[in-house]
Amino acid sequence: MSLVKQIDTARLPSHIAIIMDGNGRWARQRGMDRIFGHQQGVRALREVIEASAELKIRFLTVYAFSTENWGRPDEEVSALMGIMVQSLNKETDTLVKNNIRLTAIGDTERLASDVKERLMETINVTSGATGLNLIVAMSYSSRWEITEAAKRLSAELAGRSVNPDSVNEFNFEKYLTTHGVPDPELMIRTSGEMRISNFLLWQLAYTELYFTEILWPDFSKEELYKAIIDFQKRERRFGKTSEQLLDK
Ligand code: IPE
Ligand code: IPE
Ligand code: MG
């Protein structure tokens, strides 16, 4: 049976988050420059967006560039920014046609003005879309996000527009960049690395994690289906016992 047929469409995750890792190693294995790996990674992302839209997944968050990635060699950073602009130039029409809404999370103020403008333009033209919500984490890190949230909350507390006793984990969420987006049920990381690398630390509290050895440029629709099938075999207990879940 084909993989996609094994997916229970009634139990799909509403939000999938992906750490797209392994571009550099993929290129190196072929004796190529790391940047070639980033270019090939775009194809994999395109497939995953298409598959997510076909499955009617509501939210797809992809980690494209971390705060820490600013520390890479200048040529690599500018190549990554170039790939971002090129991909947006090339794919914005396809996003519109497929009713896909793009948003970004992260410290986009750090982006060069041409990158930021191109990103904002696509965000604007897709803002009315009602299909897949594609969230790109760009110049993003979770500690940055949580610190920003704490700063905003502190300002409100100081201005007495918020009462400290009223702060709880549910309304703290409104200060995060993912405000209004359900937490991911499934987080995929490629390339065999088993770490979170400063990605959605708050939001991943109860997410099912899926790690695969596949390097990002080799990731495909089939690999996404495998991750979803694996996810659907898990028992999500949220602190309860299996028996309690069966009693429901
Ligand atoms: C992921 O691939 C892309 C970004 C982090 C921008 P890497 O560039 O991290 O590839 P590896 O991990 O070095 O193979
Ligand atoms: C995480 O990958 C960031 C992105 C995929 C954009 P890295 O390759 O930068 O992560 P570390 O530094 O190896 O943990
Ligand atoms: Mg990496």
Image (tube, grey):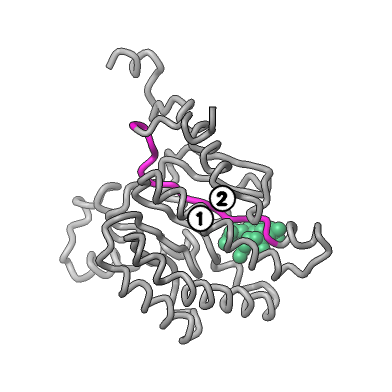
Q: Residue furthest right?
A: 31
Left or right relative to 25: residue 6: left
Kindly identify the amino acid type of the residue bearing the numbered disc 2: Ile
- Mark 2 and mark 1 in contact? Answer it, CB < 8 Å: yes
Disc ID at residue 100:
none
- Identify the residue at image location x=42%, y=53%: 60
Question: Can you give x and y, in whole percent of width and height, for residue 230 in the image?
Answer: 52, 31
Q: Under 8 Å from ligand 2: the CB of mark 1?
A: yes
Is any atom of residue 44 visible in this view?
yes
- Identify the residue at image location x=45%, y=63%: 136
Question: Can you give x and y, in whole percent of width and height, for residue 94 in the image?
Answer: 41, 66
Left or right relative to 25: residue 115: left
Which quarter of the picture shows residue 127? bottom left
Verify whether residue 20 appears in magenta. yes
Q: Which residue is mark 1?
A: 199
- Identify the residue at image location x=75%, y=62%: 27
State which quarter of the image contains the C terminus: top left
Verify whether residue 245 appears in magenta. no
Could you say whether the residue bearing mark 1 is in a helix, strand or loop? loop
Is 18 drawn above or below residue 243 in the view shown?
Answer: below
Question: Can you give x and y, in whole percent of width and height, for residue 231 in the image?
Answer: 48, 33
Q: Which residue is mark 2?
A: 196
Left or right relative to 140: residue 153: left
Q: Under 8 Å from ligand 2: the CB of mark 2?
A: no
Kindly identify the amino acid type of the residue bearing the numbered disc 1: Phe
Is 163 drawn above or below residue 187 in the view shown?
Answer: below
State which quarter of the image contains the N terminus: top right
Question: Can you give x and y, in whole percent of width and height, for residue 195 in the image?
Answer: 61, 48
Q: CA distance from mark 2 to mark 1?
A: 6 Å
Q: Which residues are magenta?
A: 10-23
Instruction: Specify the quarter for ligand 2.
Output: bottom right
